[in-house]
Amino acid sequence: MVFVTRRETFSAAHRLFNPDLTDEENEKIFGKCSNPNWHGHNYVLEVVVAGEINPETGFVIDVKELKEIINKYVISKVDHKNLNIDTDFMRGIIPSAENIAVAIWNQIKDRIPYGKLYSVKLSETENNFFEYRGE
Ligand code: NI
């Protein structure tokens, strides 16, 4: 089994906010991440596909193809967007890094033509990493 990682970056705005809670409760849980006028991050996304090497090509998956899938179904929907408002696959979801990682997994998991999606890793800052493996 070989693990292939494609790294992509995007910049997006968001606000951590749960509409079921009061402003005070949101402020208490999310602090400055709940700023009503948004804030942004430079996200780093790593998509890992695991599979056997195809002897005909020497590839698990053609990384050009993987890049195109990630760009079409994820990056085009999040880069320079507001995750709370603009991104269809984040609608109704609190845009924490955890939830974004799971939503990205769901966006691409059935679109990987070779091998299997193994993990989606997302970093929101240099110090915080979030990883989802589908379970
Ligand atoms: Ni934030």
Image: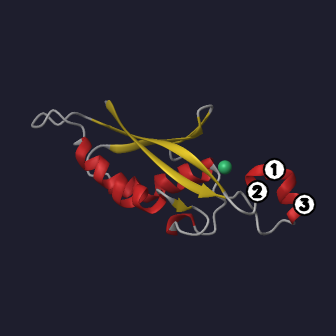
Whole-percent x, y for residue 12 in the image: 54, 55
The structure residue drawn at horizontal position 24% and vertical position 45%, both measured from the top left corner, is: 64
Task: Note whether 52 is above or below 18 in the view shown.
Answer: above
Q: Which residue lies most toward the left here?
A: 56
- Which residue in the protein does label 1 denote? 31
Circle 2/circle 1 CB separation < 8 Å? yes
Circle 2/circle 3 CB separation < 8 Å? no
Disc 1 secondary structure class:
helix
Q: Which one is earlier in the sequence, the residue at label 1 or at label 3?
A: 3
Task: Note whether 16 is above or below 128 in the view shown.
Answer: below
Q: Is residue 23 left or right of residue 15?
A: right
**The N terminus - image quarter:** top left
Task: Note whether 78 is above or below 49 in the view shown.
Answer: below
- Which residue in the protein does label 2 denote? 34
- Which residue in the protein does label 3 denote? 24
Towards the viewer: 52 or 106: 106
Q: In this view, does 23 lie to the left or right of 89?
A: right
Graded by Cα atoms within 10 Å as few (under 14), some (14 to 19) or many (20 or more), the crowding at tag 3 reads few
